[in-house]
Amino acid sequence: MTAVKTAVKTKVYIPRDTTSLAMGAEQLAAEIAAEAANRGETIEIIRNGSRGMFWLEPMVEVETDQGRIAYGPVECNDIDSLFDQGFLGGETSHPLCQGLTEEIPYFKKQQRLTFARAGITDPVSLTDYQELDGFNGLKQALQLSGQAIVDQVKASGLRGRGGAAFPTGIKWQTVLDAVPTKHNQKYIVCNADEGDSGTFADRMVMEADPYMLIEGMTIAGLAVGADQGYIYLRSEYPVAHQILNEAIARAEAAGFLGDNILDSGKAFHLEVRLGAQAYICGEETSLLESLEGKRGLVRAKPPLPAIVGLFGQPTIVNNVLSLAAIPYILSKGPQAYADFGIGRSLGTLPFQLAGNIKRGGLIELAFGLTLRELLEDFGQGTFTGKAMRAVQVGGPLGAYLPESQWDTPLDYEAFSAIGAVLGHGGVVAFDDSVDMSEQARFAMEFCVEESCGKCTPCRIGSTRGVEVIDRIRNNENTDANLELLNDLCDTMIDGSLCAMGGMTPFPVNSAVQHFPEDFNQNSKAGA
């Protein structure tokens, strides 16, 4: 095929996100640079974020007059053949060539609002960010009163993307109206302790487009009168930590953070704090305890953190994705965001495909498509090639869904109606080799390991749950123990202090309900 004409100095994009680095992107970038020098080629390597098509990572993109041409997954032993076949000129005949990145079906079919810049820019380049509408939302917010900003967030229909799906604008209104008890201090806290199985959207925001999060938190501060923000970051995200700190320093130097934001006379300061390596610290009150330097124990509610939060002051606690949606809403208007989605589930959600899936990655779409469409059209079935048997949506506390429920629309109310949760948008697939009684046991065992221990139904209930499931799996008084397990789950749901104990029964009950044959060892033996 005929090569596409390119500039004299060719731009080559190689991601610097965690997934790509785990697949060898650092060495790949070094060897591509060395090979280009050996061949007398002039290139500029730009370390971008990931586009979210993880099965193609490391995905190398070459800028051409027609757009970026993608090659992937590229390994170091592919470099010679790529150069030999003219990939710097956009040659498309190489087996690893995926064509124009924007035309890859997995990517083209998405509706990217929050992730519109992901993989396109150098994550820490302020110039790149501003060229693609960056900080337009902040500039709009600086012209508005706090109430006007909150009204726009309400009108957008944005709900918390961390799992609870509480209306973001209502939470902000509560903090705006709250009266601090000292020094007129309020706080903005970003929950970036992304611990759900199969989730990585928060990490992608922070590694691919950190200024979007910085902008969203700054707007939140302007809205409610808070001048201090904290990003509570999962400690297992060292790349995100490095990128966030670099981006914050650059934003401060350029006047987008600090005592005088864009010469407005308004202030907002932002710091990153590393998490405590505890799943429970993803719960907002436990997070606040940890952020204060204490053990991450869940607080009783009321009072709500919006009224008595960090250091006893009114505090917004929002997930990364919730805050990352704010710049689009302020820049384009709330209706532009609300035009996506269905019913009360407005906007988009970045669904994250993981587990035993052929094409894992991030898919941002408006609410309303079905789980089956996500699994088949994007995921392309299981990685092993076996039949898909079960899917867990919403993290380790989400229900296991059998095929009969895969046509459920992906929206909060539809999932609630079948006893499931969308949560943070994580989707973990299992093939037909999975033992669902083992998965039920894992749910209880996970709670044993991660419970803060403050309330008895969670702390003791999960321990007894593991013991009861073990008896069932050993075919000991199966019917009586199944009844006991059901009663135990009811107690945990009704009596636990937070969702850790209150939702652990979701995967257990769903496994028993939809896969009963896995809890009867006699029927399994005869199968």
Image: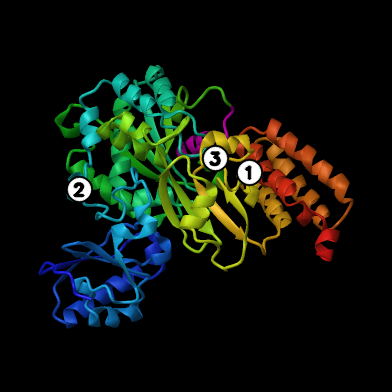
Sequence-wise first label, 3 or 1:
3
Measured in 3D between alpha carbons, the distance from the residue under mark 3 to the one under mark 1, in whole angstroms, is 10 Å
Label 1 sits on residue: 451
Part of the protein shown in magenta: 284-300
Q: CA distance from mark 1 to mark 2?
A: 41 Å
Dot 1 lies on which element? Answer: loop
Please name the residue that numbered disc 3 is placed on: 296
- Label 2 Cα crowd, 10 Å radius (few <14 / some 14-19 / many 20+): some
What residue is at 29 percent from the left and 79 percent from the top?
A: 79
- Looking at the image, what colour scheme do you see? rainbow
Q: Secondary structure at mark 2?
A: helix
- Crowding near the residue tagged with mark 3, few <14, some 14–19, many ≥20 C-alpha atoms within 10 Å: many
The quadrant of the picture occupied by the C terminus is bottom right
Q: Amino acid at mark 2?
A: Leu
Tell me which residue sits at (25%, 54%) in the image.
Answer: 121
174 left or right of 215 in image: right
**Quarter-wise, where is residue 64 in the image?**
bottom left
Does residue 441 belong to the magenta stretch?
no
Q: Is residue 400 left or right of residue 354?
A: right
Tell me, yes or no, whether the highlighted magenta stretch contains residue 288. yes
Q: Is residue 259 visible?
A: no
Amino acid at circle 1: Ser
Horizontally, residue 139 falls left or right of residue 196, namely left
Where does residue 177 sit, x and y in percent of width and height? 39, 17
Structural crowding at the residue carrying mark 1, measured as other residues with C-alpha within 10 Å and reported as few (<14), some (14–19) or many (≥20): many
